[in-house]
Amino acid sequence: MTARPARTFVASGVEGYAREVLQDPTHVRATKRETAVSVRFAAVAGPVLTREGIVQAEAEDAIVTGVDGERWPVSSDKFDEKYQALAPTQHGESGVYLTLPNEVLAIRMGEPFAVLLRDGQSRLEGRPGDWLVDYGDGSFGIVGAEIFAQTYSIADES
């Protein structure tokens, strides 16, 4: 039997960082590194199998494949602020995109945890050592430790 996560974070959909993340003394500020990723756009709504669970994507959402083959959907209303097409890919077509250096808050979790996404039905499951990422737009994500180390820079706190 799999242990149930001790803590579940619920995406609010409200702009700004979540109070429970801001108040956690272990949170860090991190910036997404510019990284080339593969993107295709969903023709129809449907499930996307991520490493952390199944996420429902809407038609026209971007399905991103990252540095280690991991996949995740990005809503069409958030895509432009997070990704830029790399030539010869044209904006809005499937191809190679660059992740933009957006700032997030993140907590490295020491126990199993879960995230309920903005759609109210997609649930991600995190393991000890994974990072809870608060994107500052009312949404959360889970990033494995190795992928986080490759794709984020933690701000110097000195």
Image (cartoon, helix red, strand yellow):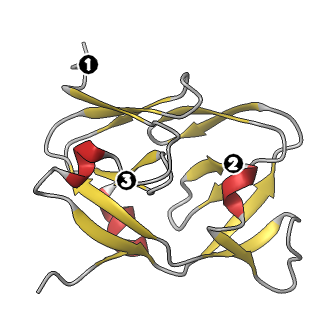
Task: Say which residue appears at 29% left-offset and 58% top-offset.
Answer: 106
Q: Residues within 10 Å of mark 2 (few under 14, many from 20)?
A: some
Q: Can you identify the residue that label 1 sits on?
A: 2
> Which label number is shown at residue 75?
2
Residue type for callout 3: Tyr
Amino acid type at circle 2 is Ser
Instruction: Determine whether the residue tagged by mark 3 lies in a helix, strand or loop.
Output: loop
Q: Is residue 96 left or right of residue 64?
A: right
Q: Position of residue 92 (x, y in %)?
A: 87, 65
Residue displayed at 86% across by 35% down:
44
Question: Where is the C terminus found, in terms of image quarters?
Answer: bottom left
Whichever of labels 1 and 2 marks the residue nearer the N terminus, that label is: 1
Q: Do the residues labelled 3 and 2 touch (CB within 8 Å)?
A: no
Q: In this view, does 155 lie to the left or right of 31?
A: left
Q: Is mark 2 on a helix, strand or loop?
A: loop
Q: Can the viewer see residue 56?
A: yes
Q: In which quarter of the image is residue 157?
A: bottom left
Q: In terms of depth relative to the viewer, which is nearer, 23 or 97?
A: 23
Circle 3 residue: 17
Q: Residues within 10 Å of mark 3 (few under 14, many from 20)?
A: some
